[in-house]
């Protein structure tokens, strides 16, 4: 068995097409993920509506929908160039971004000194990563940020190694594009090149000059933006959209401190007794730290976290021309950004931790390769030598899972929305508690839920109600809506007991009112 594995390793070491094959496989996994009837995520609907607003009315209207609309603008441009629907344009764009993520990840492993087999392990890890696979059917601007921040880092690493202008320009271009997807890229853009000041083998003046090279394109871009803004009539800081966060950096740090201290005071007064009131701040910080670590491990994935810890402690990543120092520095920056956000907002999404997770994943193929080499060097296959077989099985399962179509448990929402689009009059309003349902129906959306309010504002007899609820609550809702002069209609359900229940107003003019129907 081990002899066969050695032969496979030899063949892989001679193989020159790891990145192209990985790119093709990533496209296959994306196609499988999006080729379902599951509805678009809520953020995705917002981005599509912003793209539609940009096509119809231009920049200013897009800004009204979302104040950082560049992802939506890219979608709109691709739709106009390729003559595709906005939704299909998004998936084409995401396919390109996913290929950039996968190939840049493998290229970074190569720059770190990883052999072709280690690159092969890296391809296996990134293609099968559960969290990255989870977001493949989502429409999220994070894909663009992850892709271009990795591509920017790849060029920065090459600039760190070779100090050539083309790599400095590549860094500047790609980190600028990353910023267009998510504004927190500004932090990476501002602080990332400072690691050049600690590059060994150069004089202090050369270090300063190389750092300015890395900043050069961004300095030019910022100068153009400032000049453009200064020449705008009736200019306000709001016209820069989320660029205003640059001027609020100090206030943001003050908000972090104020927010944590306020929460600590609340805990001290409401939860702790006289003997433990001094521990309020400790409880807040420890709670946030625990939440942060849990989310980080869940994003990175437990198996990958263990492999990262093993590689980091054993120093298995090669120190190729100081590149490891750069990766560690950028990893810290990407860990600090979501930590500050958590301290300010007291919430954090897995998506915010993906940039840091993608960098921490760079350690895992080196760990897996080291464990495999130890397994190959022992005479036994399983006896006292079972770690690598277990890890191999785990990654094989994750890799196969990446090619399995996702659960279509929410397809009933899409089906219900399309049915409503085809079967209710164009002028009708739709009262619903599901934002995605309103998108697929294409009707004027009125947010309403019988659980919150027994008054239906501004209804007419041509309008419809469609509520997302549980099957067990249907009878109660039906009885309540009957008293509001609505009759039950079509029901759409999944196997988990979730339903979309459609109701229509009883066509009785005497019951129709200009504002509401009351119980």
Image (spheres, rainbow, N blue to C red):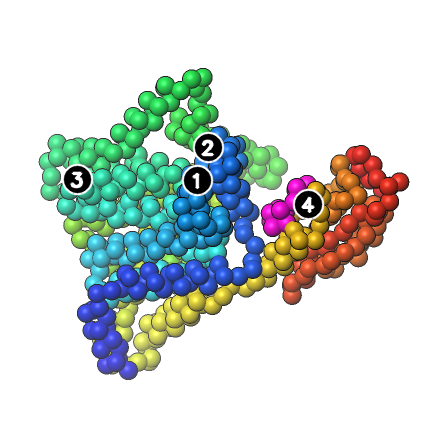
Residue 283 in the image: state x and y as whole percent.
51, 42
Specify the label residue 426 is tagged with. 4
Q: Earlier in the sequence, mark 2 or mark 4?
A: 2
Spatial CA span between label 4 and label 3? 58 Å
Label 1 sits on residue = 73
Q: In terms of secondary structure, where does tag 3 sit?
A: helix
- For the C terminus, the quadrant is top right
Label 2 sits on residue = 59
Spatial CA span between label 1 and label 2? 9 Å
Viewer-proximal residue among 174 and 86: 86
Q: Which of marks 3 and 1 is nearer the N terminus?
A: 1
Contact between labelled residues 3 and 4, with CB atoms less than 8 Å apart: no
Q: Which of marks 1 and 4 is nearer the N terminus?
A: 1
The quarter holding residue 498 reads bottom right
Residue 437 on the magenta segment: yes
Spatial CA span between label 1 and label 4? 28 Å
Range shown magenta: 435-448
Residue at 36% in and 19% down: 230
Q: Which of marks 3 and 1 is in front?
A: 1
């Amino acid at each position: 068995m081990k002899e066969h594995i050695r032969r496979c390793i030899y063949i892989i070491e001679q193989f020159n097409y790891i990145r192209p094959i990985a790119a093709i496989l990533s496209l296959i996994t994306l196609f499988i993920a999006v080729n379902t009837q599951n509805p678009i995520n809520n953020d995705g609907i917002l981005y599509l509506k912003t793209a539609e607003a940009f096509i119809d009315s231009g920049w200013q209207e897009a800004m009204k929908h979302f104040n950082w609309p560049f992802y939506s603008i890219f979608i709109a441009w691709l739709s106009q160039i390729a003559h595709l629907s906005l939704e299909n344009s998004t998936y084409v764009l995401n396919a390109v971004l996913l290929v950039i993520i996968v190939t840049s990840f493998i290229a970074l492993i190569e720059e770190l000194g990883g052999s072709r087999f280690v690159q092969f392990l890296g391809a296996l890890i990134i293609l099968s990563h559960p969290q990255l696979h989870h977001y493949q059917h989502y429409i999220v601007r994070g894909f663009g940020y992850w892709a271009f921040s990795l591509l920017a880092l790849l060029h920065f690493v090459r600039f760190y190694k070779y100090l050539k202008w083309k790599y400095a320009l590549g860094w500047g271009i790609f980190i600028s594009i990353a910023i267009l997807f998510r504004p927190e890229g500004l932090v990476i853009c501002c602080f990332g090149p400072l690691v050049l000041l600690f590059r060994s083998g150069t004089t202090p003046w050369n270090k300063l000059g190389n750092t300015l090279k890395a900043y050069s394109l961004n300095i030019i871009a910022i100068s153009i933006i400032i000049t453009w803004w200064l020449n705008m009539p009736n200019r306000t800081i709001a016209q820069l959209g989320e660029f205003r966060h640059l001027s609020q950096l100090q206030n943001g740090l003050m908000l972090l401190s104020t927010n944590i201290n306020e929460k600590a005071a609340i805990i001290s007064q409401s939860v702790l007794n006289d003997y433990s009131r001094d521990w309020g701040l400790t409880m807040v910080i420890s709670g946030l730290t625990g939440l942060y670590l849990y989310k980080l491990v869940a994003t990175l994935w437990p198996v990958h976290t263990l492999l990262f810890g093993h590689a980091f402690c054993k120093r298995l990543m090669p120190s190729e021309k100081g590149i490891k120092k750069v990766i560690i520095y950028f990893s810290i920056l990407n860990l600090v950004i979501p930590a500050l956000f958590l301290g300010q907002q007291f919430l954090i999404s897995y998506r915010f931790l993906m940039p840091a997770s993608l960098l921490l994943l760079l350690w895992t193929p080196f760990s897996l390769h080291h464990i495999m080499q130890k397994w190959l060097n022992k005479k036994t296959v399983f006896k006292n030598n079972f770690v690598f077989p277990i890890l191999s099985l785990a990654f094989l399962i994750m890799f196969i899972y990446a090619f399995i179509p996702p659960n279509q448990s929410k397809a009933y929402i899409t089906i219900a929305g399309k049915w409503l689009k085809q079967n209710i009059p164009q002028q009708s309003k739709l009262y619903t508690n599901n934002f995605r349902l309103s998108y697929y129906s294409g009707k004027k959306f009125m947010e309403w839920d019988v659980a919150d309010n027994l008054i239906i504002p501004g209804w007419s007899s041509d309008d419809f109600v469609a509520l997302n609820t549980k099957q067990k609550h249907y009878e109660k809702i039906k009885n309540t809506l009957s008293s509001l002069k609505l009759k039950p209609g079509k029901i759409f359900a999944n196997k988990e007991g979730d339903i979309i229940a459609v109701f229509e107003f009883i066509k009785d003019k005497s019951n129709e009112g200009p504002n509401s129907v009351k119980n």
